[in-house]
Amino acid sequence: MNVNLLVASTVERTAMRMLTSMDPDPAVALAQRFASILKARRGLRRQIDVQQAGGPSGPTLRKYESGTCLEPPSAQIFQKLDKGLRWTPGSAVHAWSGGDPVPLEGAGRPLVGQTPFASDSRSTPGRDVAEVRELKRRLGQSLAEQSRVHGSLLPQLEQSYAAFVRFADKLVADYAIGFFELNGGPGRTPHELGEIAFGSFLSEVAEQEPSGDAAAAENRNYLLWLAGRITVDSETATRFASRHAESLDRVEK
């Protein structure tokens, strides 16, 4: 290999390492911080859930959650972020400028345990659950469009998607049960953030036909009971209360 080319290549690699190890530009750092705040606040909600709550469109939210957009949102987008994420007016502007947003709910009432908003890390269970929910939504839309265009789907594809939906719903339900066991249950009003994070999922669960699987049906009703969505007979309430108490004992140990 030519010595001059080797030296040039070595210098180039060294320069690239130096560039990538430098502190980020302040504007980049602020954009990345803003993205982390948005993702942490959205928690388990899908981007479409935020939009339906009065927030910006999915593409706009994705743009600012990416941390790569250095252009500040418009005044209208700032207002929509406040509304969709349930922040006090002006919070999004404050967060973009390096401050902390102020939530509307939960004043003086702390959440217990790991919550959907406790971390902006994409490796936490909460982020994984949120991504599974979003993937389920996108797959469903894509398959519905395929079915509309082609008239039907391959049976294997339908079966695979149905299996994925069962897995995704169980994953979210397990996470939601853990949340409401710590922040809901008998004699307590479920924490406001539970409704924000899981409201749309709980509505989906409540509208589903009862499963023929006894264990799945039990978990479904237990979750809705913890979240204050349904009332149950005295025998079932006693069984659920016992399960709830045993779960809290395991957490404390």
Image: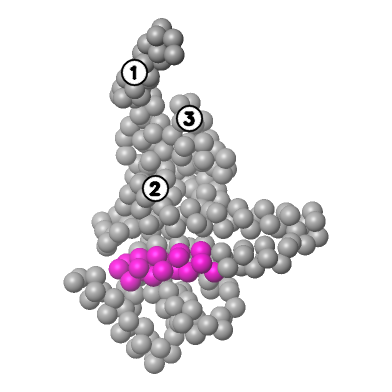
Q: Mark 3 points at which residue?
A: 69
Q: Name the residue under label 1.
A: 14
Tell me the quarter of the image containing the N terminus.
top left
Q: Residue 250 carries which label?
A: none
Q: Distance between the residues labelled 3 and 1?
A: 28 Å
Q: Quadrant of residue 110?
A: bottom left
Which secondary structure class fits the magenta region best? helix
Q: In this view, does 161 lie to the left or right of 107?
A: right
Assess disc 1: are there few (<14), some (14-19) or many (≥20) residues with their C-alpha within 10 Å of its C-alpha.
few
Magenta stretch bounds: 166-183
Asked if residue 124 is positioned above or below residue 175 in the image, the reply reads above
> What residue do we see at 46% from left, 55% from top?
130
Name the mark nearer the viewer: 2 or 1.
1
> What residue do we see at 36% from left, 83% from top?
240
Q: Say what amino acid the circle numbered 1 marks.
A: Thr
Is residue 49 shown to the viewer in this render?
A: no
- Which residue in the rendered view is the most extreme toward the bottom? 235
Ranked by sequence position, the earlier of labels 3 and 1 is 1
Ranked by sequence position, the earlier of labels 2 and 1 is 1
